[in-house]
Image (cartoon, rainbow, N blue to C red):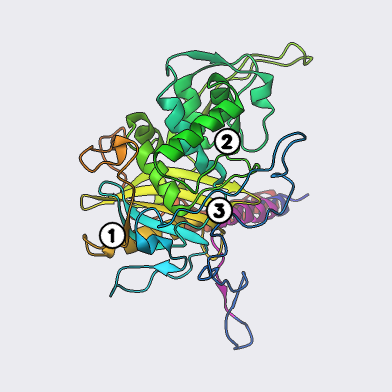
Amino acid sequence: MRIREVGLRAACLLGAAVTVTALAGAPAFAVPATDGGSSTTTTPPFTTPNTDDCPQKTQPPAPIDTSEVPAPGEPTPTQLPVPSPAVGGQRMGDCGVIVPDGVPPVPAEISATAWMVSDLDTGRVLAAKDPHGRYRPASTIKVALAIVALRSLDLDKVVVGTQADADVDGTRVGIGPGGRYTNRQLMQALIMCSGNDAAHAIATQLGGDKAAVAKMNEVAKSLRALDTRAATPSGLDGPGMSTSAYDLSVLFREAMNIPLFAELIHTEQVDFPGFPADPKIPDDKDHPGFPIANDNQLLYNYAGAIGGKTGFTDDARQTFVAAAERDGHRLVVTLLKADVRPIRPWEQAARLLDYGFALDTQARIGKLPESGSEAVQPSVPLASPPPRADGTRADPVQPAHQGARIATLIGGPVLVLVLLLWARRAFRRRR
């Protein structure tokens, strides 16, 4: 094959590669019509779910699989009672969009079926949609597991990974049999990467899955998060699993009273241990350690982001809880049964946070509970995340990696041109 052909093919392949890399993960965009007509889009129109008739007042939507079928011999959980009046104030009993009088309409393109924005420090509820509607939490329920674990486990204790840890369903951080992990490292894996294997290792120390779930439910009840019932430590769907946008805000606010929780949700990356070769596997070798990164995109992309927790299952869909700070105010946003369209959950959260920060500082439609843990008392300061390693807070002006994408989009064609010129000169030398 001629050198020029090699150069041309290499240039084309490289050009395509850098372009695909630059555009990977970009949201759907309008495509101009070539016939003079109107633009078309790559995704179908989206309609925000209507909850005005309180469809989830007593229980989450019907499951789409068998994950909530009780095991043989296990009873079917009864529906949780619906408190009357609603916890948090009269308006918290409404099911549609709830905002203070005289404020602008809520942001568009919010696919979350239920959501809420509240003040992390004062407990004021600023705006909400179906705040006490019952939905599945997915991995956001790990916030409740973190509360229990951080207040009961020795964080310096070394735990040896098991095959049972490695075999759990769903998202795993990469715990291996024989690996040695401190509880602090397990908490990093739980909170930053939503590792179900870490949840299993933590729950085992709490007495097993059933005992851990019971303790999580005790915490929820003590905080008057009465829409919440954990069925698994990890957030995998199970019989009776339930929470609400209101309850998720309550649980997150409680967790933020624990300094290490506030630190971990704000941590971008840490090193995680590996594990030894499995003697049962021929020619297996030691598995080295590896870095793990926070999976919450709001942390990288939103000015003043404090951090939060993501979640997803087929039945729960996208779930999310996070906090951010602006001008001395710290707000929490929760999303339940969201989708990745028309914009991603973290982007929906960002819009709702912007909306909350723009409201009057005294605006309110309800209140988070004052009973239960002292962590929800205004007189008790909540933990603040530490600054980053360079001593600064995160306040990006543009989405993370956007600069890299722009550089790639510009540099890719330049690199292609250089390769073409090189191929042309090489071809001339050989003629």
Give percent across and percent down for residue 377. 26, 41
**Mark 2 and mark 3: Cα distance apart in space:** 16 Å
SS type, badge 2? loop
| Pointer 1 with pointer 3, Cβ within 8 A | no
Q: Earlier in the sequence, mark 1 or mark 2?
A: 2
Type of amino acid under label 1: Phe
For the point 36% across and 48% down, the residue is 323
Give percent across and percent down for residue 285. 69, 15
Q: Can residue 295 be seen here?
A: yes
What residue sits right under mark 2 in the picture?
A: 234
SS type, badge 1? helix
**Mark 1 and mark 2: Cα distance apart in space:** 32 Å
| Pointer 2 with pointer 3, Cβ within 8 A | no
What residue sits right under mark 1 in the picture?
A: 357
Neighbor class of circle 2 (other Cα within 10 Å; few <14, some 14-19, many 20+) is many
Q: Residue furthest bottom?
A: 36
- Of tags 2 and 3, which is closer to the observer? 3
SS type, badge 3? loop
Q: Earlier in the sequence, mark 2 or mark 3?
A: 3
Q: Can residue 385 be seen here?
A: no
Q: Main secondary structure of the magenta part?
A: helix
Q: Is residue 260 above or below residue 8?
A: above
**Mark 1 and mark 3: Cα distance apart in space:** 26 Å
For the point 30% across and 37% down, the residue is 375
Between 199 and 380, the one lying in front of the other is 380
- Residue 239 in the figure: left or right of residue 259: right
Q: Residue furthest top?
A: 279
Between 62 and 17, the one lying in front of the other is 62
What residue sits right under mark 3 in the picture?
A: 135
